[in-house]
Image (tube, rainbow, N blue to C red):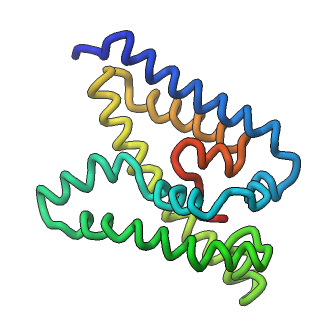
Amino acid sequence: MKSLPALDLGVIAIYLLAMLLVGFYFSRKNKSAEQFTKASGTIPGWALGISIYATFLSSNTFLGVPGKTFGTNWNAFVFSLSMPLAAWFAVKYFVPFYRNTGEVSAYTHLEHRFGAWARTYAVICFLLTQLARMGSIFFGIALSLQALTGFSMKMIIITMGICIIIYTVLGGIESRDMDRGGTRDY
């Protein structure tokens, strides 16, 4: 198998390094849990909308949806078309609601409204869904990069995972917004 040229591999390495530097940069700004999770409420609504939309974008969006649409049916494509509307709706109604109540996330709201069982149930469902989603995203990226670079899928997945964990844990919500959209816990 022929590998990518050194210049292309260098671009990938620079991207991974830049991701880590973003995390380190924003880690200096985080002095409290509120800054880490909500950026102290300073991210404007339009940026949150883009971030929420970007949260749904992944290798699955760019590789899987066109392939599934071409190969089987248009359901995934039609779902993708609804994402800008969902992001607009979230920014218009949910973000102001959470900012006004002072809650960190939907999970704390569920706990205050219905009790700890509701928060626990929602967290478990969300985490299981995200684990499955991350697995398929990492697999899609690893398939693409393995075909291009010839590196092992295991090494690609571990490298990506370590970089993502470092910049997210260090930088908080602002670093996640810099790269690909962050989380939905505004």
Quarter placement of the N terminus: top left
Q: What residue sits 35% from the left and 71% below the top? A: 82
90 relative to 120 in the view: left or right: left
Quarter placement of the C terminus: bottom right
Q: Position of residue 181 (x, y in %)?
A: 54, 52
173 relative to 79 in the view: left or right: right
Res. 4 image quadrant: top left
As drawn, the residue found furthest toward the bottom would be 114
48 relative to 104 in the view: left or right: left
Relative to 154, is 125 above or below? below
Relative to 83, is 159 above or below? above
Relative to 101, is 182 above or below? above
Q: What residue sits 38% from the left and 31% below the top? A: 153
Q: Position of residue 13 (x, y in %)?
A: 49, 21
As drawn, the residue found furthest toward the right would be 31
Q: What residue sits 31% from the left and 20% below the top? A: 150
Report the front residue among 99 and 106.
99
Q: Position of residue 164 (x, y in %)?
A: 58, 39
- One can see residue 40 in this view: yes
Report the front residue among 175 and 120.
175
Q: Position of residue 24 (x, y in %)?
A: 73, 32
Q: What residue sits 87% from the left and 52% below the top? A: 32
Relative to 36, is 166 above or below? above
- One can see residue 132 in this view: no
54 relative to 42 in the view: left or right: left
Q: What is the total number of numbered labels drawn onto the structure image?
A: 0
As drawn, the residue found furthest toward the top would be 6
Report the front residue among 150 and 76.
76
